[in-house]
Amino acid sequence: MNKEQNENLEVKTDNEIFKCPGCGSNMFYDPDHETLSCDYCGSQIAIDGQTNVNELDLFTASDDDNSWEAETKVVHCDNCGANTVVDINDIARVCPFCGSPSVGSSDERAGMKPTSVVPFKVSRDEALNKYTSWIKRKTYVPKTVKNELPNPIFNGIYLPTWTYDANTISSYKGRFGEHYVTTVGSGKNRRTVTRTRYYYVNGTISRTYDDILISGSTRLEQKRLDKISPFNTNVSKEYDKRYLAGFSAEHYTINVRSGWDTAKKRIEEDIRSSIIRKYRPDVVSYLHIKTHYENITYKYVLVPLWLCTYKYNNKEYGFMVNGENGKITGKYPISIPKVLLTIAIFIIIIVVALIIYGLISENNQMYQLLK
């Protein structure tokens, strides 16, 4: 049964597992075609996902919201400590972070149901190809790792994130300084010195912030999320559990209000930087800013990541691939012999250069003596 024949068929569900209408096998979300796909018979079902344009008022969010609990449960990995949200009827499971089968039920509640999801667009094979191209550009990576990953654990997972919108009006006052050069003294004591001329500033500044992306995971801290970003959360889809078929979702450990605290710090840093850029001072003596926030809204967005870990010489390495655009970042082993060879070549080049310089200097001296 081909894709066209399946377009008008509904996916039957059995305890939240998506069943193929053609053969009854389990279906999984396919990033290559952005459909539910059956590996057994090749059937595909389109997902007509709608862009989520709804923002929620931050002050209506509740820490006691467990709206996702009806269809999911949280499992805990005894090996690495990760908490993962899986289908409520899922039994066979390994940890998507470390690959350990030591995964069991957790007392942790599933919590708030996501409002949006950025679906995978990069397939597993494409993510591996991204890694291959990336790692081959690293000069000091051992050849064996470049050729083939040693026993990799490779999983697709949705990371919990919060996005925040806000309008701000800030009043500020400060004391800035600019350097200038002047001449002082006379006679032998005459010299130039650098001094600072101070001036006072004040005013107001208005800013609009849209979809500030904040990690909801303590396992993937904000700096690492920034490194693997961007994710196009402005066109994220309304949450649909079919996008998660065959994937896991990490349970958020940073709630929506704590996420706002982080977003607020970013906003304050941006406002401060904007004011300083306006005046371009050489010195900031002080700058006091008071900011009023309006229309603070949020979305709970699942963003896609491919995670891979592997061991080389008894040390663990890994990389991440942005499941939407293929951006990659990670850690990799360094070949000590390659590093030592580079150092040796560098030393040889320096020694040869010094010898040549010495010979040229000696010849010049001899030439001067013979003149």
Image (cartoon, rainbow, N blue to C red):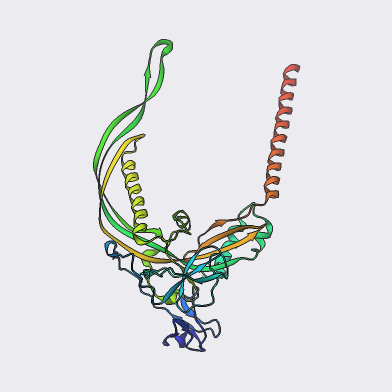
Question: Residue 280's quadrant in the figure?
Answer: top left
Residue 371 seen in this snapshot: no
Please provide percent x and percent y for residue 110.
41, 70
Q: Residue at x 34, y 70 (%)?
A: 52
Image quadrant containing the C terminus:
top right
Which residue is most to the front? 107
Please provide percent x and percent y for residue 355.
73, 31
Please provide percent x and percent y for residue 114.
38, 69
The one nearer the camera, 113 or 121, is 113
Can you say whether 49 is above or below 222 in the image? below
Question: Residue 144's quadrant in the figure?
Answer: bottom right
Can you say whether 339 is above or below 221 in the image? above
- How many marks are shown on the rendered structure? 0
Question: Residue 366's quadrant in the figure?
Answer: top right
Which residue is most to the top? 187
The one nearer the camera, 264 or 53, is 264
Q: Residue at x 51, y 78 (%)?
A: 91
Q: Is residue 247 left or right of residue 362?
A: left
Please provide percent x and percent y for residue 368.
72, 18
Residue 175 seen in this snapshot: yes
Q: Is residue 18 left or right of residue 172?
A: right
Can you say whether 20 is above or below 243 in the image? below
